[in-house]
Amino acid sequence: MSIVVVGSVAFDTVRTPFGEVDNALGGAATFFSVAASYFSPVNVVAVVGDDFGEEHLAVFEEHGVDARGIERAPGRTFRWGGEYSLNLNERTTLFTELNVFESFQPKLPPEYLESPYVFLANIDPELQMSVLEQVEAPRLVACDTMNFWIDGKLEALQRLLRKVDVLVVNDEEARELSECYNLVAAANAIMGMGPTAVVIKRGEYGVLAFLGNDVFFAPAYPLDRLADPTGAGDTFAGGFMGYLATCGKLDPASLRRAIVAGSVMASFCVEEFSLAGIRNLDQEAIARRYRAFQLLTEFGDL
Ligand code: AMP
């Protein structure tokens, strides 16, 4: 079953202790689409400027992602710059240029309207809402956001959350949105805002998920080589939604497996800069890493 995703398609300038890239293809919807494409069909909604070349569009095509919903508008593509601390856990945003996203009014191609799975990747909550309103009968709506929107568009975000099933955020965002430091309290407060599940990404400390009454923890995969965490959250969401869309079930066991599928994809993402870690994967590599995750936390009876 297919997924429709709206979010940023961007050029990222990233500095980490292990290197840097200038104007590399990125954006939340891009990382999401490439990651989800290994599991299920993806329809992407975004806007790019006239500086966005065919070689960038080809990345979507190479992964079988339907890019008819990427509109081209006069002006510059969304640009973001960030710098990471030595331990890669802290990030400073150097700049955010919305550019063509500032006046974007998404209009979904007719082929997208019946997609049962909807992912509202990180972008203005008003744009997220406008996409959600166009999808006819979504089966599962998941959403991401970030401090930029919690600070700047809180009311629009709260309106949106009433219509969302799963919120996928990092720990700082969960704390800021709920105004609770404790993550259990934060998840409960967020579930009071609309979502029935809250998936909290904790970087190298893994994922803590509140799935209705079920609580699940998945570790991050211990890697000896980390290059760039940019997009890991969106890549996680791509694996998570992609798995759910392909398995067709939403019971607790399937949600748990989806969280591990997301963690598998995120572990590939952080190994390289930009999209390089997830562009050339195959099913065998994904299955091998999934098995490695199983072994990581497998222990017998006492
Ligand atoms: P993540 O590392 O998962 O937070 O995602 C990083 C990606 O989000 C980068 O590729 C950026 O282009 C994109 N991004 C950064 N800030 C924003 C924003 N305010 N709105 C939408 N996308 C953003």
Image (cartoon, rainbow, N blue to C red):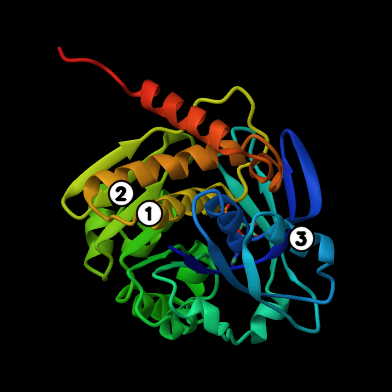
Q: CA distance from mark 3 to mark 2?
A: 31 Å
Could you give the CA–CA distance between mark 2 and mark 1, rounded to whole angstroms?
7 Å
Please name whichever residue, 295 or 168, is drawn nearer the observer in this view of the structure. Answer: 295
Residue 233 rendering spot, x and y as whole percentages: 51, 50
Q: Is residue 57 shown above or below 226?
A: below
- Of labels 2 and 1, earlier in sequence is 1
Q: Can residue 182 be seen in this snapshot?
A: no
Q: Nearer the viewer, mark 2 or mark 1?
A: 1
| Residue carrying label 3 | 58
| For the residues bearing labels 2 and 1, Cβ distance under 8 angstroms | yes
Q: Earlier in the sequence, mark 1 or mark 3?
A: 3
From this viewpoint, is residue 58 visible? yes
* Front label number (3 vs 2): 3
Q: Secondary structure at mark 2?
A: helix
Q: Secondary structure at mark 3?
A: helix
202 vs 44: above or below: above
Residue at (31, 38) in percent of width and height: 217
Q: Nearer the viewer, residue 32 or 12?
A: 32
For badge 1, the amino acid type reads: Leu
Residue 255 has which mark? 2
Which quarter of the rendering shows the N terminus? bottom left
Q: Residue at x 58, y 84 (%)?
A: 106
Query: What amino acid type is highlighted by mark number 2?
Result: Leu
Task: Spot the residue most to the top.
Answer: 302
Q: Choose top left, top right, bottom left or bottom right for residue 205.
A: top left
**Crowdedness near tag 3: few (<14), some (14–19) or many (≥20) residues, C-alpha within 10 Å:** few
Q: Is residue 185 above or below residue 78?
A: above
* Residue tagged 1: 244
